[in-house]
Image (cartoon, coloured by chain):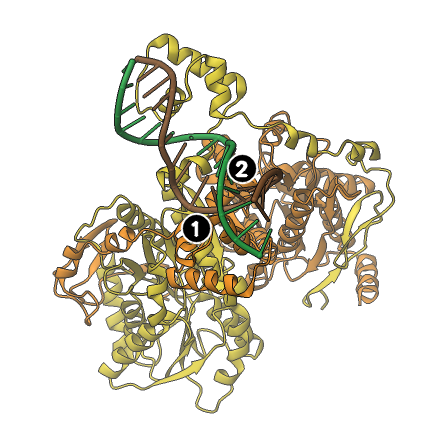
Chain colours: A orange, B yellow, C brown, D green
Amino acid sequence: MWGVAEERADEWLERENVFRILRGRVILVKAKGIRGRMGDPSRHRQKPGKRLLMKKRPTIRDVAALAGVSIATVSKFINSTQRFTAGVERKIQAAIDELEYHSNPLARSMITGKTGAVGVAILDISNPHFTNIVKGANRVALEHGYNLLFVDTEESQAREDELLIALSRRVDGLIVSTRMPEEQLHRVLGFGKPVVFSGRPAPKGSPSIAVDAYAAAYMIGELLVKQGHRNIAYAGFAPARPDTERMRGLSECLQTHGLPLTRFEVRGPTIVEGEQVCAGIVLRKDRPDAVVCYNDMVAIGFMSVAKSLGISIPDDMSVVGIDNIPFGRFTSPALTTVDTQSERLGEEGMRMLFREIAGEQTSEAGHVLIEPRLVMRDSTRVRHSEAAAASIAKARKRAR
Amino acid sequence: MWGVAEERADEWLERENVFRILRGRVILVKAKGIRGRMGDPSRHRQKPGKRLLMKKRPTIRDVAALAGVSIATVSKFINSTQRFTAGVERKIQAAIDELEYHSNPLARSMITGKTGAVGVAILDISNPHFTNIVKGANRVALEHGYNLLFVDTEESQAREDELLIALSRRVDGLIVSTRMPEEQLHRVLGFGKPVVFSGRPAPKGSPSIAVDAYAAAYMIGELLVKQGHRNIAYAGFAPARPDTERMRGLSECLQTHGLPLTRFEVRGPTIVEGEQVCAGIVLRKDRPDAVVCYNDMVAIGFMSVAKSLGISIPDDMSVVGIDNIPFGRFTSPALTTVDTQSERLGEEGMRMLFREIAGEQTSEAGHVLIEPRLVMRDSTRVRHSEAAAASIAKARKRAR
DNA sequence: GTGAAAGCGCTAACAG
DNA sequence: CTGTTAGCGCTTTCAC
């Protein structure tokens, strides 16, 4: 039947008079304007934007002059560091309003040493795990009246150092996710700004926050064992920090039950790599009856290819992810995973950062672990053993 | 069978000696350190971080002193605005290396008026459409040696103005997505910084970039009609800018074919709202044979609930999304959608912004439209008419 | 080629 | 209460 294949159908429609981006280039297709939007070409002669740029922004001096007071007075008024007589305050406010004055944060920062911004460096904004960290971090930053700067280091790994340095100089503190080797982390601390490391333990003396990867993996191991799986594989991603802990949690758990663990490697924590690794796992003669994926992205790619190889999940094989990205609910089958509470990670990380910025050296500094939670859906199922099923049923009841 | 229901199973594992975040609070569970990571409590007395903050960063003056030259010389050397005798350059470089000097971008910005950063204001980083815009924008920004600042306005709609102002003062230009009424956009332009509006046409004189929403919707209309659908619904989200164009594209297309369009409203461009709106559409006696969703998120939610209501997609009903978010491939059935090329939108938008920053007023300024592409997957199918099927088959052949 | 001096826009003592 | 003064760290003429 048609419709199953994925394809693109361009050019179904004839349109015109539009600047289009076609085959990677911006080209002008005719020049008459479409639905009145393009406007007449004459406006280009106006140097749009330029005109606006010309209008110099008013400075504190302009305000002071217009209000007939000194700039110091204006400064104090703006920062509400001092009250003045009603008349003066009214005049200043009027001047500010009239000039539409807004203070220049850069100038202020230079003196105060505070920037009013915090930074987040993450590995890949496309990964919902990191997206949610940013979301959470941003929320808390805004609550504190701070702006958020962000750097996606994946985009330019070679320049990670440079990027972090540049970022650090623009902010009052940063949250950093990095695969940088342990021995180089001190460089980040050397920036002289408060730092919270995320996703890995920090060097002694600095705070960090991460999900308890060991526990997450251990939970998954327990689940799979209780469900009766006996031949379990882990599709890991060694370069990532949490990989070690996940591997250890899983293997220690299985070891407790006298079960082996087979390890496979993906080349990235992505859907594509999950797709790549799949065949090598499901087509081997000793096919695992369950595979734990480095994260949900890998699991999604894995399940997709498995399906196309005629492997039924969970009937032929169980699949588990890690992270609980929002879309895991909508795969087919819905993905069993462990919730790493990414958004909360971002929120708590930012709170820690603000505590550090405020100079509070509470006893909480250190490595904060976020508790993972098992999210059971349909990509795993009970195998063989009746006993296992019963035990799980009990667990479910307890969980309510 | 068990395993179908989604549930969380906490506390399967007994762990200890960890700072955990449990039930929303950070609590300390014992204090002995886990696997050697927590370290001894004594380090808290060291005021970690504080010590590092003490170490003042070297300034250009320090470098000049150490190198035995004037600060002006150092400045010119750093900015490569002038060459010096080899000996001098070597000494300066040595001093820089020894002190690990990095120039303070804030101080530089104050003088040059350039910040070396660009800003992106988006509506919701959780929406993969925007995530990809940021991804693309960030890539281009980095290529140009710029940092990216970002603001998620959804997080604080009430403060949108304030956020944009603060952002604008820290950057050399910004890309703005906003639902702000037309008549308020001039305020954004009033910031005096180059702006590219994304997702909507800009006021006269400023550049903007968007996917051609009209074309996208028109394409979908054509597809559905050719597939033989006769009772088509649109689950729109009126507050969003592209909604109008999508609605218009769809209805004009259907009108051409003498077909009606029924409109429904979602209360947000999210999965949850797609779930909410579903029942009201599929349970009405005159059930549509196809529903076009405001975006992929809505479509995903919609399909999920439809399935649970016993509606088979695409057999009972076709569903189409817009955006082509990465996860649309992995829903069940895979989602037919229109690719809005979000990442490219971000890239091109940033390129436009840099052109504007550079002061190039090319003839390209204006409203740039990105060409959408139909992505046919499995959530739509041919209905009834043999003729339609044949015509589609021909279209497919042409598309190859 | 190199350096002295004048600020960028603002804050933070300290005077008055 | 209000103003004066001295910079923050850097760039940028303009002399030497």
Q: Mark 1 lies on which chain?
A: A
Secondary element under disc 1, as helix, strand or loop, is helix
Residue B48 lies left or right of residue B255; in this view the side is: right
Q: Position of residue A345 (x, y in %)?
A: 65, 51
Identify the residue at image location x=77%, y=44%. A364
Outermost residue toward the bottom?
B285
Outermost residue toward the top?
B87
Query: Please, is residue B214 above or below residue A322 in the view?
Result: below
**For this rendering, which residue is in front, B158 or B33?**
B158
Q: Label 2: few (<14), some or many (≥20) within 10 Å? A: many
Identify the residue at image location x=63%, y=49%. A350
The residue that label 2 is drawn on is: A168
Q: Are marks 2 and 1 on the same chain?
A: yes
Q: Position of residue A252 (x, y in %)?
A: 78, 39
Residue A240 lies left or right of residue A162; in this view the side is: right
Q: Can residue B241 be seen in this view?
A: yes
Image quarter where the N terminus of chain B lies is bottom right
Q: Position of residue B46 (x, y in %)?
A: 77, 31
Q: Give the residue type that dot 2 points to.
A: Ser
CA–CA distance in space, label 2 to label 1: 28 Å
Q: Residue B101 bears which disc, if any?
A: none
Secondary element under disc 2, as helix, strand or loop, is helix
Q: Residue A60 bears which disc, if any?
A: 1
Q: Which chain carries label 2?
A: A
Q: Where is residue B175 in the image (x, y as percent from the top left)?
A: 37, 54
Identify the residue at image location x=65%, y=57%. A336
Mark 2 vs 1, N-terminal side: 1
Q: Give the residue type that dot 1 points to.
A: Ile
Identify the residue at image location x=42%, y=61%. A95
Query: Please, is residue B117 above or below residue D13 in the view?
Result: below
**For this rendering, which residue is in front, B35 or A283?**
B35
Q: Can residue A124 be seen in this view?
A: no
